[in-house]
Amino acid sequence: MAKIKKIQTQFGKDCRISSLKGVKFIDFKNQNKISRIVAKEFLNSKNKKIIKKCIICRSNKIKPATTVLGIKFAQCKRCAHVFNKHHYDNNFLKKFWKKKGDIINVHSHSNQQKYRSNFLSKPKVDLILRYAKNKKNLNWLDLGCGNGEFLFSAKKSGVKPYGFDLNSRDVKLARSKGLNVFQKNINEFYEYAVSKNIKFDIASATGYFDMVNDPNKEMEILNRLIKKGGILMIDLPDFNSVTHEMIRGFPSESIRHLNACQRSSFTSKSLLFLLKQNGYKVLFRWHYGLDFYMIMNYLNQKNKYFQNTNAMRIMTKRFSEFQKIFDKEKGSDTLFFIAKKIKG
Ligand SMILES: [Zn+2]
């Protein structure tokens, strides 16, 4: 009898928080401001419709989940998926990502980007490559690749880097790094890949499947692009986390997640459902996140003088240790899976 292989699991990721994110009152305030601006855009959008079926498993058994800055989220009783209660017009979304997407991206400056690439992207790239069976001439596709920060790390490992994104400024930046990045959606990118006869050994999606209207449809197209035995990395926010509990408790000061532009907030149950339904087997899960940063956020937004306290100094300095407790308790806010395409 075949042995059932357990999913490999890893806990914690060292993080120098002050190099990754702002830790001053104004940084938290600005992130909150961005969440508010985005929420307002979506609340004012025309032609939105209420979603009546779960966008992952199509069940019609749905209950209210939470409301953040006026944006309502619903949860499927069957697969536990959480999603924005409204379906927004495609033209609105396209316009939002082309222009307004910029306001979401402005908060990381260049020294933060350097840290991100060395300390955050590279460990992930190395990990993914460990699971890719043939190590030479690999084609790598990054879905919704942004400015190509992650893809650039992949390129340095010797793979052929491809990506697409709707934000024009990001695409320009990515192309300036020598990456094959296009201002296209997945459909348009698929047409391009077919015309060039390109198939992929590896695909990565950071904060992508939670942003698209129909994750199953995206998966279907991705499945035509990725080879059998190919590797898919998915990295997105986990609704069942300390961070999301805090946002639900204090929605008016929320930052980072349950943003209006998020179409979905996955749970591990709903992400596993999506992967299994589309022919993937999960090989690896990593528990890490920035939940402790959310505690720092709320304390700082409550009192702007908190940024100068010894408490804040200690929390900033020992961030990784505090966060590791949430990781080990499986309460952290990132769903990070590496899966293998085993069907079709
Ligand atoms: Zn469902």
Image: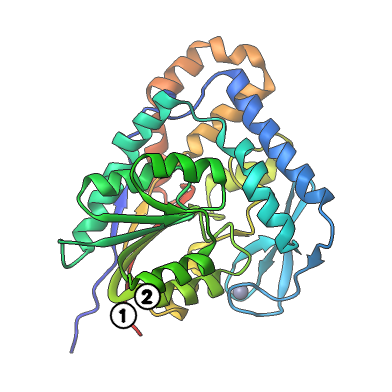
Instruction: Determine if the C-beta at disc 2 is less than 8 A from ligand 1.
Output: no
Residue 119 image-quadrant placement? top left
Position of residue 60 relative to residue 312, above or below, is: below
Residue 247 image-quadrant placement? top right
Q: CA distance from mark 2 to mark 1?
A: 6 Å
- Image location of residue 85, percent across then percent down: 74, 62
> Which amino acid type corresponds to the residue marked 2 in the rendered image?
Tyr
Ligand 1, image quadrant it occupies: bottom right
Residue with the mark numbered 1: 342
The answer to whether the residue labelled 2 contacts the one labelled 1, judged by CB atoms less than 8 Å apart, is: yes
Dot 2: what SS? strand
- Image location of residue 138, percent across then percent down: 23, 62
Q: Residues within 10 Å of mark 1 (few under 14, many from 20)?
A: some
Q: Which residue is drawn at the image coordinates 19% and 58% (left, top)?
A: 130
Dot 1: what SS? loop
- Image location of residue 15, percent across then percent down: 36, 33
- Image location of residue 99, percent across then percent down: 66, 43
Q: Nearer the viewer, residue 97 or 30?
A: 97
Q: Is residue 75 visible?
A: yes
Residue with the mark numbered 2: 280
> Which amino acid type corresponds to the residue marked 1 in the rendered image?
Ile
| Residue 111 shown left or right of residue 231 in the figure | right
Residue 19 image-quadrant placement? top left
Q: Quadrant of the C terminus?
A: bottom left
| Residue 13 shown left or right of residue 28 in the figure | left
Q: Which of the two discs, 2 and 1, labels the residue nearer the N terminus? A: 2
